[in-house]
Image (cartoon, rainbow, N blue to C red):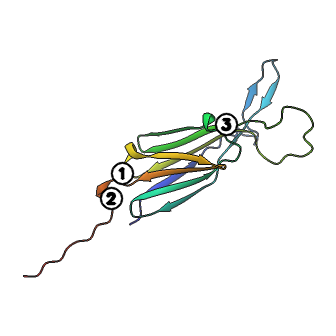
Amino acid sequence: MSTTMTTTKHNPQNGNGDSPSVQSGNGEETYQATFSPRFDIWEGDDELVLYGDLPGVDPDSLDIAFENRQLTIHGKVSHRHDDDRMLYSEYGVGDFHRTFTIGEAVDGERINAELNDGVLTLHLPKSEAAKPRRIKVTAN
C-alpha cells in the first residue's frame, strides 16, 4: 500500500537569485542562506520513516510541527568557529526549512523524532485504518 505524501522545498530567493537580506545590529545588510535538507522516505506496513540529513544541527534549534496534514521541519545551523581563521568552507550556515504534506493515513498524535549523529529520524505511524490487513476467506 502506498501512502500519499508530497514534499515542498522552501526557496525564499528574490528575483536576482540572492538569499533574502537581513539587517545586522550595526545597520549593515547581510545575506542569510535558507537550505532545504535532503530526506529519504521509507514506507513499511506500520509506519513511514523519514531520514533527514542535518549535520551540525543542535536539537534545541530544531522545530518540528504537524498541523493540517503538513509536517514542517525548521531550524538553524550555526557557525562552528567564531574567528576569521577558516581557511576554506563548503558547509552551509543559516536557516533550513522543509515541508511535507502527509496523507490521511498517518496518526499525527503518535509522530516522534530523534536526532543522532546529524541524522534526523521521524517516525510517522500509520493509522489502523491505513494498515494492510488480511481478509479471511470462508467457504460455505
Q: Amino acid at mark 1?
A: Glu
Q: Position of residue 17 (x, y in %)?
A: 75, 43
Residue 54 disc label: none
User: Could you tell which of marks 2 and 1 lies nearer the N-terminus?
Assistant: 1
Mark 3 residue type = Lys
Which residue is under mark 2? 130
Label 1, secondary structure: give it: loop
Residue mark closest to the camera, 2 vs 1: 2
Residue assigned mark 3: 76
**Whole-percent x and y of residue 133?**
28, 67
Q: Residue furthest left?
A: 140
Give me the C-alpha separation between circle 3 and circle 1.
29 Å
* Quarter of the rendering occupied by the N terminus: bottom left
Label 2 vs 3, first from the N-terminus: 3
Q: Residue at x 37, y 48 (%)?
A: 107
Could you tell me how far apart the alpha carbons at marks 2 and 3 are, in whole angstroms? 34 Å
43 above or below 25? below
